[in-house]
Amino acid sequence: TEVEKSLMIGKWMDLSEQPAWLDCSGLTNGVCRKVGLTFPHGSQNQFNFTVATTTPKMGDFAFFGHDGDITKVYHVGMVWDDLFMIESRGKQKDSNFETGKVILRPRIRWEKYLPQFLGYRSHPKLI
């Protein structure tokens, strides 16, 4: 039904296939599920589920919150390596950058996006 389809927008439901497009928490949720880890959907839920780390490593997460507020989380990405993050943004028609696809973005750009950058966090099973 249309209601069911609208609830799945941006989610990676069938892990055997590459999705047509993703939002940020759909990407991180799908990657975790692909490697056998339980992980909620929604960037706020993911922030609340994870644990802060000052030494991020590949597979850890980084979050943005409106005005740096940890109760207003709106974006999540995943650490790729020492230099890059992987992220995806939900489809946005009027965006000046590509949306709906997984992209690499320099970590330094995330870290300098203040006050929105909330820091790095780890999945509790990977600590």
Image: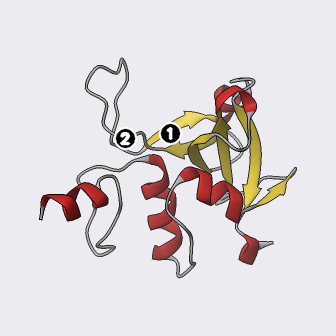
Q: Position of residue 44 (x, y in %)?
A: 61, 51
Q: Is residue 108 above or below residue 20?
A: above
**As drawn, is 9 to the left or to the right of 69?**
left
Q: For the residue marked with disc 1, what is the amino acid?
A: Leu
Q: Position of residue 5 (x, y in %)?
A: 20, 60
Instruction: Kindly state the secondary structure of the residue where label 2 is placed.
Output: loop
For the residues labelled 1 and 2, say whether their Cβ atoms are less than 8 Å apart. no
Which structural element holds mark 1?
A: strand
Q: Amino acid at mark 2?
A: Gly
Q: Residue furthest right?
A: 54
* Quarter occupied by residue 26: bottom left
Q: Say if 87 sits above or below 30 in the image.
A: above
The residue most toward the left is: 1
The residue lying at 69 percent from left, 65 percent from top is 49
Residue 40 vs 42, above or below: the answer is below
Using the image as rendered, state which of residue 51 and residue 101 is in the foreground. Answer: 51
Q: Give the residue pinned by disc 1.
A: 104
* Residue bearing mark 2: 90
Which tag, 1 or 2, sits closer to the chain's start? Answer: 2
**Image location (x, y in percent) of residue 31:** 49, 66
Q: How many marks?
A: 2
Q: CA distance from mark 1 to mark 2?
A: 15 Å
How packed mark 1 is, by other alpha carbons closer than 10 Å (few <14, some 14-19, many 20 or more), is some
Expressed as whole percent of the image width and height from the top left, the position of residue 88 reads: 43, 43
Q: Residue at x 49, y 64 (%)?
A: 29
Give the quadrant of residue 105.
top right
